[in-house]
Image (cartoon, coloured by chain):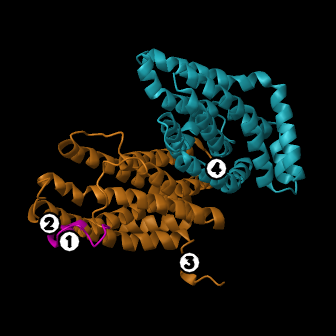
Chain colours: A cyan, B orange
Amino acid sequence: MNVFNAVLLRDLRVAFRRWSELAHPLIFFVIVVTLFPLALSPTAAQLREVGIGVLWVAALLSSLLALDGLFRSDADDGSLEQLLLSPAPMTIAVLAKVVAHATVTLLPLMCLVPLSALSFNIPLNALPTLAFALVLAAPTLSVLVALGAALTVSLRRGGSIVGLLVLPLTGPLLIFGTRATDLSVNGEPTAAPLLFLAALAALAVSLGPLAIAAAVKVGLE
Amino acid sequence: MKLPRWFHQLGSPPYVYRLAERLAPWLGGLGLLLLAVGSYWGLVIAPPDYQQGDSARIIYIHPQTAYVGMMAYVVMAVAAGIGYVWRMKLAHAVAVSAAPIGAWFTFCALITGALWGRPTWGTYWQWGDPRIMSEALLLFLFLGYLALRGAFDDRDKADRVTAILAVVGVVNVPIIHYSVEWWNSLHQTSTLLAEGGPAMTIDMLIPFLIMFAGFTLTFYWLLLRRLQAEIVEREGNARWLRDWLAGARNE
């Protein structure tokens, strides 16, 4: 557990020292969300109808934007190799990196989504469900994004390809996430899709770090 | 556990190349023959559907291509997994060979489905249909695999990295499939695996199954031929390969 804490603290510290970079995905999210009403009709009823989907897709896209910093800079300065050489299990270290990354990128995003939901006229009573669904989706999403970053760690121009790898895998998240929010807008019980999201999160957190660690190892060989 | 001898032989490129050379004509010949027989039976002899008329004859092409596309993904992922764990280069070659074939079969399943959808559902493409969506996502997984592969210059590294992606993908295929299925479906449920036996008369069932066998054998025929090409590319100037090719030229 020492490794976990050490890596987590270090990554958080590094992230906060480059805090302006942390804002990029958030600004991207706000821009995408602004573009949709421009492209669609701006009537309130229509915006409410597409709003939930737009917010979820924008959140997925902006989480992709943030992944470059996850392994790349550590691979460049050699600290990732030091982690590999250390006797500590790589899966734990990778898990810590993913948690740190999710804290600094996904958490602010999650605060922003319910706020933007208000601007789409999504009813107030659906916001807790929306926020809860996002929190449940976050572990799966960050594991998938980290996997994309790990698979492309040795590629100079990995950024353009990661979307191709990660986005098809986020389909289930999108289905259950939007479904939960839709149901709560209509005042129906939302337990089923939320439980599915939780199950996906459990699966991703337990198996994901193994795949990520393997990908990092191969990438640095 | 002591592994049997043939298992070790499957790791040897010359052995596998020659095995493929011997098997491929049989698989290809039998596969194409079955496809010809099944097509004739299905398109000419079998009765038209009482509701959908002749457009229902897509059932002799469409489910089979969709099935082969999924099978190709599993073959690819299992081969890639074996290659990753046992560092078996030939297994990676199998995975690489399966990917484009699987992508094409998945693409064909989408196209044939669209052609059938127009007269039957009244639309080529229905965004709300789960099976169309999971098939499209499967195609994207294939394309992502091929794109990742193409991004690497170093073949060994490409093998191992894409193997991880393939294995992660195969864990996700059922999740994607069932989560998408959870949507409201327009697609008809499986005809073959229906409760209380196949919901088809016997004169439709026989060509239906013949086409399954035909497409499966054709897939493995294509796989073996691609595998041979992949071996030639990987082995480059190996002695046995040059001897073999020289021998083939002299015959």
Between disc 1 and disc 3, the foreground one is 1
In the rendered view, tell whether residue B7 sits above or below residue A158.
Answer: below
Three-letter code for the amino acid on which mark 2 is drawn: Trp
Label 1 – label 3 distance at C-alpha:
35 Å
A199 or B221, which lies in front?
A199
Q: Residues within 10 Å of mark 1 (few under 14, many from 20)?
A: some
Residue A197, above or below A132: below
Mark carried by residue A201: 4
Q: Position of residue B163 (x, y in %)?
A: 59, 56
Residues at marks 4 and 2, CA–CA distance in whole angstroms: 49 Å
In this view, the residue in front, A128 or A91, is A128
Residue B51, percent across and down? 13, 55
Q: Are labels 1 and 3 on one chain?
A: yes
Residue with the mark numbered 3: B7
Of the two numbered discs 4 and 2 in the rendering, the one whose residue sits closer to the viewer:
4
Q: Is residue B137 above or below residue A59?
A: below
- Circle nearer the viewer, 3 or 2: 2
Q: Earlier in the sequence, mark 1 or mark 2?
A: 2
Q: CA distance from mark 3 to mark 2?
A: 40 Å
Say whether marks 1 and 2 touch (CB < 8 Å): yes
**Which residue is at the front of the view, B15 or B72?**
B72
Q: Are marks 1 and 3 in contact (CB under 8 Å)?
A: no
Q: Which residues are magenta?
A: B193-208
Mark 2 lies on residue: B41
Q: Are marks 4 and 2 on the same chain?
A: no
Q: Amino acid at mark 4?
A: Ala
Q: Mark yes or no: residue B117 visible.
A: yes
Q: CA distance from mark 1 to mark 2?
A: 9 Å
Residue at image location 71% in from the left, 33% down from the top: A107
